[in-house]
Amino acid sequence: MPTPTQVVALLKAQNIRHVRLYDADRPMLLALANTGIEVTVSVPNDQLLGIGQSNATAANWVARNVIAHVPTTNITAIAVGSEVLTALPNAAPVLVSALKFIHSALVASNLDSQIKVSTPHSSSIILDSFPPSQAFFNRTWDPVMVSLLKYLQSTGSYLMLNVYPYYDYMQSNGVIPLDYALFRPLPPNKEAVDSNTLLHYTNVFDALVDAAYFAMSYLNFTNIPIVVTESGWPSRGDSSEPEATLDNANTYNSNLIKHVLNNTGTPKHPGIAVSTYIYELYNEDLRPGSISEKNWGLFDGNGVPVYVLHLTGAGTVLANDTTNQTFCVAKEAADPKMLQAALDWACGPGKVNCSPLLQGQPCYEPDNVVAHSTYAFNSYYQRMAKSPGTCDFKGVATITTTDPSHGLCVFPGSLGKNGTSTNDTSSLAPSSNSTTSGCLSRYRYSGDSFTISVIMCGLLLLTSATFL
């Protein structure tokens, strides 16, 4: 993994302004000093019992991990434990005490208005999550949840929830459509409808968030906001995880970013964006477990983007490519028949200008379906402003930062020989495609400025001004 200094250099290079740590690592907090980056620190689960049983232990933790670093390091939140009710249920009886003891130490130092305290939950604590209006928290934990929600309400904090449509999709045995999990557009007759509220759900993410809102309402709490503290999609998996792919990870995270930054909100709370952490900043090659567990990152351990996220009008997100030079190319191992079908669509209904592929034209050679598809796919991708999902073509295309131009064949989006960007000027057509410890990145949107924040050894936060 990169050193703290290297990590902070990456954050600054990417204009990441918010970071969440899965612990309170001193070297990392020191490296973050004087950067202005807002930091969320965490109490690891293995320290929770001690803190939850002793006000003095909690005060010492705050003194050592918070007071020693502020205001030089801009700490703005503390996450106490992680998925405690499901991962460490024996600590459940002291969970709320731990939050209160931590908060008391902040009050004593006059930091309670600056630093919020909460605890992340797995969405699995919500039972019967669809329809959302019938959802409720596992009643085993009602005493804990009522006490927790009272605390969050009284301190102006928020419910932290980890939301993974990937796992919901995998565990549904085909009941949940992949497009529904990936935020891809659905025809109206395919949308999920809550029969009690008649609210329409176009994606798993919104349904789970609203299920949490309704579960809180069931306990008579209606004014506590939700922050999604983890969400993402793995870019690689083993044979039992066929949907853990680069394309799906890019599609999910790109569409999630677009969903949040558009202030779409959820059907229950339209227009109120849900602040969201995307898991995670770096791949974790040494992490035990399945292949997918190692491959949730946006960057590899060397800081190289695993894939490049895009937002229309916002340029490249989390990438070293400051010139926004990305291209859509055909996958070398793709089925030739599928490539040909996608090529036919791009040059036909997709309205790509494929005349450079004609015999005697500069992009005719090499005369094979992979080369011709690459030109057509990239032309469509560039013309659609590199919008999420426009480099998919039913799985036979992928994004690259390598310019595929060759000889006199200069691809749309290439800087070309004279350094001037070339673009297909054909009329736009509607898209047929929708489109050990780890470290995280969070995106924040405020007004018309787009910045990024990171969870070190964790996540990525998308948020709008709504909850800032």
Image (cartoon, rainbow, N blue to C red):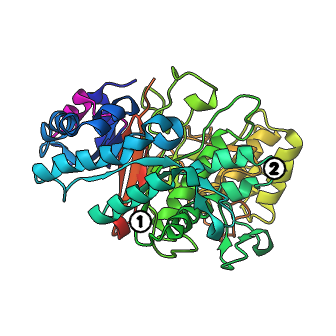
Image quadrant in which the N terminus is located: top left
Residue 436 drawn at (x, y percent): 46, 23
Residue 42 drawn at (x, y percent): 33, 39
Residue 305 visible from this viewpoint = no
Under circle 2, the secondary element is loop
Identify residue for label 1: 225
Q: Residues within 10 Å of mark 2 (few under 14, many from 20)?
A: few
Q: Compare residues 369 and 280 and report the one nearer the observer.
A: 280
Distance from Cα at disc 2 to Cα at disc 1: 32 Å
For residue 240, above or below residue 34: above
Find out whether the residues at labels 2 and 1 contact each other: C-beta distance under 8 Å: no
Three-letter code for the amino acid on which mark 2 is drawn? Gly
Residue 461 visible from this viewpoint = yes
Residue under the image location 76 percent in, 58 percent down: 346
Residue under the image location 86 percent in, 52 percent down: 341
Residue 347 drawn at (x, y percent): 78, 59
Q: Compare residues 260 and 52 and report the one nearer the observer.
A: 52
Under circle 1, the secondary element is loop
For residue 200, above or below residue 371: below
Nearest to viewer (mark 2 / mark 1): 1
Q: Would you say residue 196 sits in the magenta stretch?
A: no
Q: Compare residues 112 and 68 and report the one nearer the observer.
A: 112
- Quarter of the image for residue 389 reads bottom right
Image quadrant in which the C terminus is located: bottom left
Residue under the image location 58 percent in, 74 percent down: 267
Total marks in image: 2
Residue under the image location 44 percent in, 38 percent down: 281
Q: Which residues are magenta?
A: 22-33
Q: Compare residues 351 and 260 and report the one nearer the observer.
A: 260
Q: Which mark is residue 174?
A: 2
